[in-house]
Image: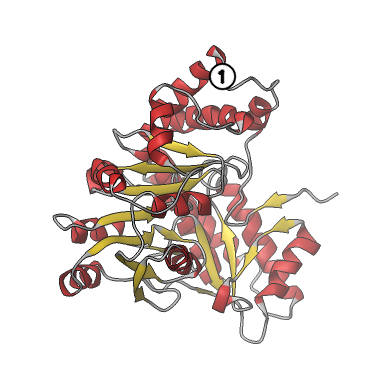
Amino acid sequence: MKKYQLMAPGPTPVPSQVLLAMAQPIIHHRTPEYEALYIEVRAGLKRLFQTSQDVIPLACSGTGAMEAAVVNTLSAGERVAVVRAGKFGERWVEICRAFGVDVIELPAPFGETVAPERVAETLRTHRGVKAVLTQHSESSTGVLHDVRGFATATRGTDAILIVDAVSSLGIADLPMDAWGVDVVVAGSQKGLMLPPGLGFCALSEKAWARGAASSLPKYYFDLAEERKFVAKNEAHFTPPVSIVVGLREVLRMLEAEGLENVFRRHGRLAQATRAGVEALGLEVFPRATPSPALTAIVSPRGIDSEKIVAAYAQSHNITIAGGQGEMKGRLFRLGHMGYAAEFDVIVALSALEQVLADLGVPVDFGAGIRAAQKVFAESSSRG
């Protein structure tokens, strides 16, 4: 028997208590029971997003939430700047152009980030930029962008800052109000430890004001209409009720652990994974700030990374992910977000040692595990 483990950068494992909560008999979404459920979820989402604004849940993927952010704050012909440093930066470009928005691309090689000074310079030299769009954690490359720096660059300008936090919410600190982020979008299937099916949008007052002038077509993703229903603790359209029930359980779990502890845990798992990977002679891909959500690793010379992904699955029943876009065949990615703990990292590194050996790569067995355990031991001694 081989125990199955999901260690991809999304979807991520769902805790047993969340699965049990979702297995309860479904309730109707126009009942006092659902209203009571949503009152708790509504308050918990504000704390998670670190905002005084209501968070709008949508029955969609994270990409649906990205589209909702665009169509509710922009108009055709308006100009935006997009941080394009990975597959999901490219997705912002594609969504904007699909709706006739004029895009100024701020490209960076995959594995690198864009300096906030470059964003500020773009806003100075290109008049009329209405928004800056970026990822927080670019999961295709494993890079964490400097959203706080981007917020400083947009502060005091006409531009709003729109952030894709799909692979950072509940993983890396992103205090929306304190940093001055105008729009944060996320999904249910990564740091929130839920099945795919819920997207989220949180907007600042500046973004809501911008939305009043937006002329892009929207019906299902009309956030102003959704906001009216959220204020009444109701759903506009039929929500994925069982996932909302699971969300309440997740929010309780995160509250019990404490957000600061959640962020520290993810940072510790990421540091240990990187140490283990490097101890095996492999290269961690991001040349800039690595994300605590996942570790992107350069495949050994002469080995297609898809072979490593396949070996994890076939020999160890572990699902990881390969590279995306131009990095396909060159990277493999280990997720350590959401329902993840120290021994998940140990298992992933142990399997990696065996996979590399099976593919003919010289391996010092135990080196990766020792390096990770050293990180865990040192972090425990520091409290």
Q: Amino acid at mark 1?
A: Arg
Location of residue 47 (image quadrant): top left
Q: Nearer the viewer, residue 170 or 79?
A: 79
Could you say whether the residue bearing mark 1 is in a helix, strand or loop? Answer: loop
Q: Position of residue 128 (x, y in %)?
A: 20, 66
Q: Say above or below: 153 vs 251.
A: below
In the rendered image, the quadrant that contains the C terminus is top left
Point 52% across, 27% down: residue: 248
Image x and y of residue 307, in percent: 72, 74
**Residue in the picture at 75% in, 49% down:** 4
Crowd band around label 1 with a 10 angstrom C-alpha radius: few (<14), some (14–19), many (20+): few
Coloring scheme of the render? secondary structure
Q: Would residue 365 be visible to someone looking at this image?
A: yes
Instruction: Check disc 1 and report the residue beneath it.
Output: 30
Q: Nearest the camera: 61 or 50? A: 61
Residue 377 appears in the figure: no
Task: Between residue 312 and residue 164, name the one nearer to us.
Answer: 164
Which residue occupies 39% across, 57% down?
Answer: 136
Return the x and y of residue 286 as percentages of the image width and height.
Answer: 44, 71
Q: Is residue 151 left or right of residue 383?
A: left
Could you tell me residue 85's position as x and y percent?
Answer: 42, 71
Residue reaching furthest to the right: 1
